Amino acid sequence: MLAQFCLPIDLASLSKRFNADGVVVLRGFVALERVGQIRKAAMDAVVQRIPPFELEAELGYPGAPASTADVGGGTIRRLRNMAGRDPIFAEWAGDIKLLTIISCLLNTPQITLTQAHHNSLMSKQPSFSSDTRWHRDVRYWHFSRPELVSAWLALGDETTENGGLGFVPGSHRVDFPSDAYDENEFLMADHAEAAPWVALAQFPALVAGDVVLFDARTFHAASRNRTAQTKYSLVYSYHASSNTPLAGTRSSSQAGLVFELASAAVIA
């Protein structure tokens, strides 16, 4: 079972499990009142449809509309640049409890929120959402080192029925051969070397206020939303400030937000 922590959190214990599994769950990490405020602002942002955003039809994953001209073709998959859209999103990006944990996991007091990747509201809507197959985020992120941590905030219930994320514990430490991936760099679940790992996958059920922290090298996947309610999640990714994006890549296309943290042993 994935390691699950409730406040207060011992950082040494959390760091040990994160290093082993590449993913941990923080239960009830954000107060429900604050989650409600973030969720309302997020839903308003989806309705306003202010760019930049990504449509399901643009990616064309299984289950998505075939084109933007088809029924459901305007379905938003994610809103981008969330930290810059509204103070409520920026406040969560700079949350001191969250940043202190991430600083511990990255073993540095100087961390940066990348605005070029994730920094998104994930909107998995009924009828026109899609399946995301097994992948690791470093397949399209380019930094000096592949050491980044993502913080996934559930703004409501997340289950396998509405497209909740699944993770392969320990997969951040595994290198698969090139023929284990398809042409889009998704891991082929039936590959001889990948299958035993995929069989270990876990899909944690989340409720509003839960946070999942995962290494950018940890394989994860999600199905389409098969319920009648839209699922919203807010995800940011962080790296050590010394871990710079490579010039000329998308990772360097936007300046990150830099934070300096003091050391701590326990998050209350």
Image: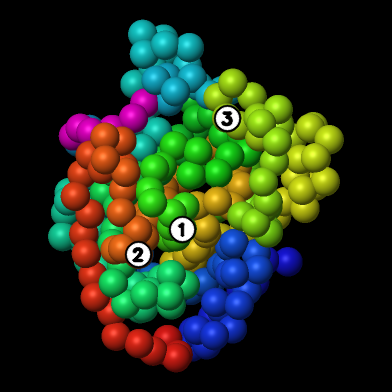
Quadrant where the C terminus sits is bottom left
Q: Residue type at mark 2?
A: Ala
Where is residue 70 drawn, in percent x and y? 41, 9
Numbered range of the magenta stretch:
50-55
Three-letter amino acid code of the residue under disc 3: Glu
**Mark 3 nearby-residue class (10 Å; few <14, some 14–19, many ≥20):** some
Label pair 2/1, CB-CB below 8 angstroms: yes
Residue of label 2: 240
Q: How is the image coloured?
A: rainbow
Q: Is residue 177 left or right of residue 89?
A: right
Q: CA distance from mark 2 to mark 1?
A: 8 Å
Please tell me which of labels 2 and 1 falls first in the chain: 1
Task: Return the residue at label 1.
Answer: 147
User: Where residue 10 sits in the image (x, y, percent)?
Assistant: 52, 87
Which mark identifies residue 185? 3
Q: Is residue 97 left or right of residue 18?
A: left
- Which quarter of the figure has residue 264? bottom left
Measuring 49% from the left and 44% from the top, which residue is drawn there? 137
Tell us which disc is closer to us: 2 or 3: 2
The alpha-carbon separation of the residues under discs 3 and 1 comes to 19 Å
- Dot placed on the residue nearer the N-terminal end, 3 or 1: 1
Residue at position x 38%, y 48% from top? 143
Point 36% across, 37% down: residue: 78
Q: Which of disc 3 and disc 2 is earlier in sequence? A: 3
Taking the view exactly as shown, the residue that stands out farthest to the top is: 69
Local packing at callout 2 (Cα closer than 10 Å; few below 14, some 14-19, many 20+) is many
Say if 100 sits above or below 77 in the image.
below
**Mark 1 Cα shell of 10 Å, populated few (<14), some (14-19), many (≥20):** some
Say which mark, if any, is on residue 50: none
